[in-house]
Amino acid sequence: MLAADFLNLKDEIEMINNSEADWLHLDVMDGVFVPNISFGFPILEAVSKVCTKPLDAHFMIVHPERYIEQTARLGTMMMNVHYEACTHLHRTIQEIHAAGMKAGVTLNPATPVCVLEDIIRDVDMVLLMSVNPGFGGQKFIENTIRKVERLRKMISEAETHTLIEVDGGVQAETAPRLVKAGVDVLVSGSYVFKSTDPCSTIQALKKL
């Protein structure tokens, strides 16, 4: 949603509702953990009232554990927190699950997937950032492909059903390669919302 037209946000959400998109990805930024500020709970609450798709809330903030209950009250499906922002990650995952949501963990580009070896069975999804978090429209970081492959191997060896999600620079050229490497969920912002036909763009991504 970060790439949407915020002056016409209701229309943008309706487009998503009418598209083949599975989820709506929400990037919450605080200007501390990442060098940008996006939107907070007043916007999230408004969106939750009109969006018919499950909400995938990605918190790029310090102390995300403070907002678990508030996020759950919106009917959020997935709460995604950064490994780098959580001192007590296992406890945070437990609290997200206790609040009735699925728990996702996000890794920045420079954070190796091996840090999740002792927790991979407890998380529902791992989000790999394929750009440095904070701004949309950035160039895809090529190492992400190899990182996906390493994470897919870890998940297979752990015999768990953890999903792999990738966010950043997902478009016509990178998306097929990511799917081939083992990605389950593609997050695409600018490529979709800046398209002349967003619904057709989403449909093309769905066919991969």
Image (cartoon, rainbow, N blue to C red):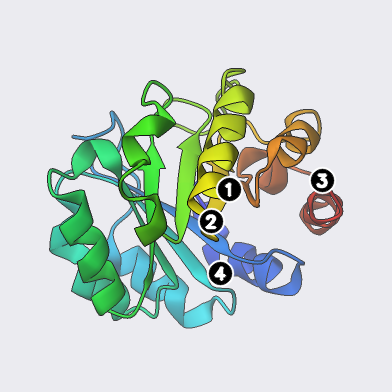
Q: Amino acid at mark 2?
A: Glu
- Identified by mark 4, the residue type is Lys
Say which amino acid is labelled 3.
Thr
The amino acid at mark 1 is: Ser
Sequence-first disc among 2 and 3: 2
Q: Is residue 29 visible?
A: yes
Horizontally, is 19 left or right of 122 in the view?
right
Q: Position of residue 139 (x, y in %)?
A: 59, 20
Q: Mark 2 = which residue?
A: 159
Residue at horizontal 80%, vertical 28%? 173
C-alpha span from label 1 to label 3? 39 Å
C-alpha separation, residue under disc 1 versus residue under disc 2 = 5 Å
Q: Residues within 10 Å of mark 4 (few under 14, many from 20)?
A: some
Q: How many other residues sit within 10 Å of disc 1, few (<14), some (14-19) or many (≥20)? A: few
Instruction: Indicate which label's residue lies in the foreground, 2 or 4.
Output: 2
Q: CA distance from mark 2 to mark 4?
A: 41 Å
Residue underneath mark 4: 10
Q: Is residue 151 above or below residue 199?
A: above
In the picture shown, does residue 91 fall above or below 150?
Answer: below
Query: Measuring 51% from the left and 40% from the top, which residue is drawn there?
Result: 154
- Residue at 50% in and 26% down: 131
Give the residue at mark 1: 156
- The CA distance from mark 4 to mark 1 is 40 Å
Q: Which mark is residue 196?
A: 3
Label 3 SS: loop
Upstream in sequence: badge 1 or badge 3: 1
* First in sequence: mark 2 vs mark 4: 4
Where's residue 80, x and y in %?
A: 37, 55
